[in-house]
Image (cartoon, rainbow, N blue to C red):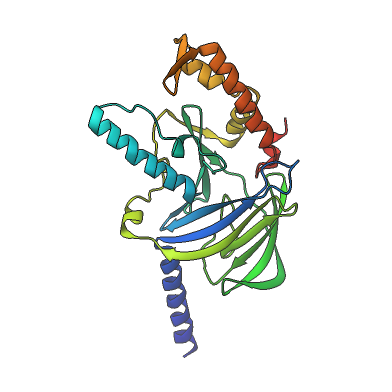
Amino acid sequence: MAYSEKLIGIVFLFLFVSLFSQHQRFTYDYQYIPDSTRMQDKRTEIMYLDVAPGFSRFFSGETFKNDSISKAITDKQMKATGRVDQIPQTAASKNNTIRYTVIKNYSDHTVFFLTRMGRSKYNVSDRRTMSWSIHPDKEVIKGYAVQKATTDFGGRKWTAWFTADIPVQDGPYKFHGLPGMILKIEDAGGSHSFTLAGIRKLSDLEIENLTPSGSFVFDFGDKVDIDFPKYRQIFLESRNDPTKSLRMTLHDLEKVNVNGTMIDKSTYLRERELQMKKTIQDDNNIIEIDMLKK
């Protein structure tokens, strides 16, 4: 009798795990403070963690929506005229949206960080491990019993709340490795926090478009596979010289078309450099703050 009950329990657990690995979307409210000199300026982004058998994909819902709308417009231009006259601003330069994607491979626990700098797409393999301490503290989030865990990652101390009721070792951003889904996580300084807003099953169309490598709506430019240390080097170089890629792209031109007006390339680059350096200056409180250490 005891063996039968144990077997039934194992079967039930297997079915439960299978259920939550079959194309579920976990929606998180991401609150963050981009500029440490303006702690009152807290921003919010809706983030999606799409869980599929074998992998997950984490990305900004707002960015994906804007890029999808823009792609539909550019596809219409291409079909009508055979060329794209201009990428709509709703996608190309929308401020305060998260532009990266995080892919987690469940089979070997590999994390891939996909982002873009200039015309290059970077597929960054991040094999750093997370060392968790699990604490006895318990709470309830969205009806799920959760337990406290802490870790140090990216130069910050993090407190997470995970639930064993959803037996998927995953969570928002790069966070993973606890015996259950992370429903909430925040850093000690209050600069970055992810909180579960809801869970739903993906539609057939969403499942069809969910792949372990596809992440960019605008899939242009070269793809570069690199490891995390190399990406950190490129990231710092880009912050120090933000127009380097743009200068290379425009090196054969003397003038640049800006909204239908031709202006001198050097003037354009100078203005763009000032804009980009101001953006970088205001983005000094990134989630992995140790990336800024030289």
Is residue 32 positioned above or below 135 on the image? above
Q: Picture quarter containing residue 214?
A: top left
- Name the residue located 73 percent from the left edge and 43 percent from the top edge: 38
Is residue 164 positioned above or below 239 on the image? below
Q: Looking at the picture, tell me which residue is in the foreground, 120 or 63.
A: 63
Q: Position of residue 1 (x, y in %)?
A: 46, 91
Q: Looking at the picture, tell me which residue is in the foreground, 114 or 258.
A: 258
Q: Looking at the picture, tell me which residue is in the foreground, 202 or 165.
A: 202
- Residue 171 can be seen in this image: no
- Residue 160 can be seen in this image: yes
- Name the residue located 28 percent from the left edge and 36 percent from the top edge: 76
Q: Residue furthest bottom?
A: 1
Report the label total. Answer: 0
- Name the residue located 46 percent from the left edge and 27 percent from the top edge: 119
Q: Where is residue 203 in the image (x, y as percent from the top left)?
A: 34, 60
Q: Position of residue 42 (x, y in %)?
A: 67, 50
Is residue 184 positioned above or below 241 on the image? below
- Name the residue located 45 percent from the left edge and 39 percent from the top edge: 90
Q: Position of residue 226 (x, y in %)?
A: 52, 33
Q: Picture quarter containing residue 195?
A: bottom right
Left or right: 173 with respect to 151?
Answer: left
